Amino acid sequence: MEEVKLHGMWASPFSYRVKWGLELKGIPYEYVEEDFTNKTPLLLQYNPIHKKVPVLVHGGKPVCESIVILEYMDEIWSQYPLFLIHSFDRAMTRFWIKYADNELFGGRILFGSGSGEEEEKARAEGIEFLKTIEEQCLGDKKFFAGEEIGALDLAFAGIAHWLPVVEEVSGTKLLNADEFPRLYAWTQNLKHVTVIRNNLPDADKLAGLYNRLRDQRLRSVAE
Ligand SMILES: N[C@@H](CCC(=O)N[C@@H](CS)C(=O)NCC(=O)O)C(=O)O
């Protein structure tokens, strides 16, 4: 089997999408941790356009962008398909992932200019986003992909583990169990899946990082 390497970063939900995909498929891989203040020359060589993680290197060839990587993995390793089999279902999955990846409200709440107005707008958009995916995408299913987790669950996992940290650091509650019972139940179901549970960044460490970055951002805006 050709060598598989994953360049990632411990706090990056995009890196975890790929890590979980590899774990679900049972693919042995070497993990390379990237430091964003001192990226490895290999990362810059593999992803010269965006210079971002994750990058999956398969047999020396780099594949970039988490969702492109997951699709590639399904084509190369057919066990535990992450995308659904039927073309229509696959198209819907891609649609919702694109929708989610355009919604960066968490980043705006945490690392915006700190203005109350901007945070309130990001919060309102976040709640609208959660409502849309609960009603129109999750419905009454256990997981977004059905009975087992799939690409959509990996793509939305930020809501289950990263969002609570964003809420804590910013003091802004979005995912209320009373308001979003089905989505909240999904976050619990997801965190019970062994591969997810065993591969999550420490929430306190994540909160420490987000606090530092938020302070830096607020100081630079104040200057
Ligand atoms: N659309 C990309 C997003 C990847 C991304 O934003 N990666 C961040 C970490 S979460 C990164 O590498 N940032 C490094 C930097 O901006 O210098 C994907 O899905 O892979």
Image (spheres, rainbow, N blue to C red):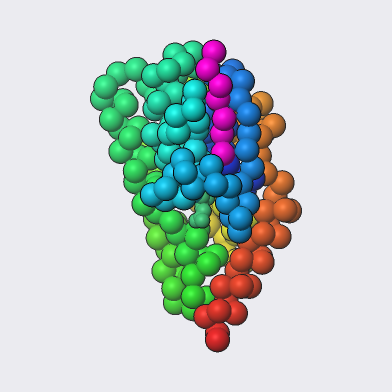
The answer to which of 9 and 178 lies nearer the viewer is 9
Q: Which is more toward the observer, 21 or 193?
A: 21
Q: Quadrant of the N terminus?
A: top right
Q: Position of residue 208 (x, y in %)?
A: 71, 60
List x then y, in percent, for residue 150. Answer: 47, 27
* Position of residue 193 in the picture relative to residue 108 (left or right): right
Q: Quadrant of residue 215?
A: bottom right
Residue span colored magenta = 1-7
Residue 14 can be seen in this image: no
Report the number of numbered marks.
Answer: 0
- Where in the figure is residue 185, as x and y percent of width and height? 56, 37
Placement of 170 over or under 154, stated as above or below: below
Residue 165 in sight in this render = yes
Quadrant containing the C terminus in the rendered view: bottom right
Q: Height in image: 44 above or below 126?
A: above
In depth, the one of 92 and 72 nearer the eye is: 72
**Which residue sits at x=58%, y=51%?**
39
Along the viewing direction, whichever of 16 and 207 lies nearer the viewer: 16
